[in-house]
Image: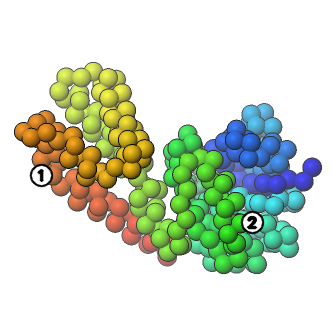
Amino acid sequence: LPTKLGVIGGGVMAEALISRLLAHNTYTADDIAVGEPTAARRQFLLDTYGVTVCDRNGDALATAETVLVAVKPQVFTHITGDLAAITAARPLILSIMAGVPLQTLEAAAPQCPVVRAMPNTPATVGAGMTAIAAGQHVTPDHLAQADAIFAAVGEVVTVPEHLMDAVTGLSGSGPGYLAVIIEALIDGGVSVGLPRATAQTLAIQTVLGTATLLQTTDLHPAVLKDRVTSPGGTTITGIAELEAAGVRSALIEAVKAACQRSQDLGSA
Ligand SMILES: NC(=O)c1ccc[n+]([C@@H]2O[C@H](COP(=O)([O-])OP(=O)(O)OC[C@H]3O[C@@H](n4cnc5c(N)ncnc54)[C@H](OP(=O)(O)O)[C@@H]3O)[C@@H](O)[C@H]2O)c1
């Protein structure tokens, strides 16, 4: 059977995508072939998902209409030959390699439609945020296809490539910021007498619930804040402390610094 999706690198992010693309019936196991160097990992992917697994990337890509590049960026130079070998068929190439620009990808796969994607860690539980940027040979159909593939692991937005560093600073690094915020909320709970496990449940569900509320209702965050602050009440008292500590500014500067760091790493 001809393979529809060829995957280079059967790691964490590739598995997140494969498992949900199969669950959503976007592809069947027969449609997917994965090139992966580690034998134990190949066996795991075969046993768990029934996808074709290959020692040599070329075998996984031979008939692929769409190619997902899911290796670490440092490995990219080792797989450019595998891409060059299949450019004649003009497959749609999707890259999730952090920091590898479209120009570099297009040089490795001349004339091919290339989409660069930046997913984040919650993609591994289907709650990801992926930004995609289109290369010069990408048609609206290609972009829709890329969108459908990354939609399997969460939300998708399309941005011009020059905003990828900004995306990295917000949604890419954001899970780290929120982990720190949640940990601090838990410590706050413990400091006012809650058992740690209880504080953890309260903190996580509060963050998740607030995000779900904002997403579901489309309410502006400032409107929600106004609604939950009664005059002289507990919430405005807590917010006054957040403002005094410069929480807004800290978060704004965190996104700016991470964006700058992403730019620096990209041009290094
Ligand atoms: N995980 C995330 O949350 C996340 C978020 C945003 C972006 N990304 C990006 O996604 C990419 C993949 O990340 P990941 O977390 O999925 O990494 P990962 O789990 O390390 O997956 C990479 C896989 O590629 C395999 N590999 C190494 N060399 C190869 C080669 N020459 N040919 C084929 N496969 C090869 C690795 O096998 P071995 O283990 O045997 O080396 C590994 O299974 C990275 O560029 C990362 O920046 C990840």
Percent of width and height locating residue 199: 30, 27
| Quarter holding residue 258 | bottom left
**Side (left or right) of 250 relative to 164:** left
Q: Residue at x 39, y 45 (%)?
A: 217
Q: What residue type is labelled 2?
A: Leu
Q: Residue at x 18, y 55 (%)?
A: 246
| Quarter holding residue 21 | top right
Pointer 1 residue: 244
Pointer 2 residue: 92
The one nearer the camera, 186 or 243, is: 243
Judge the density around disc 2: few (<14), some (14-19), many (≥20) Cα neighbours within 10 Å. Answer: many
SS for dot 2:
strand
Q: Which amino acid does label 1 sit on?
A: Ala
Judge the density around disc 1: few (<14), some (14-19), many (≥20) Cα neighbours within 10 Å. Answer: few
Residue 267 drawn above or below residue 12:
below
Percent of width and height locating residue 129: 51, 52
SS for dot 1:
helix
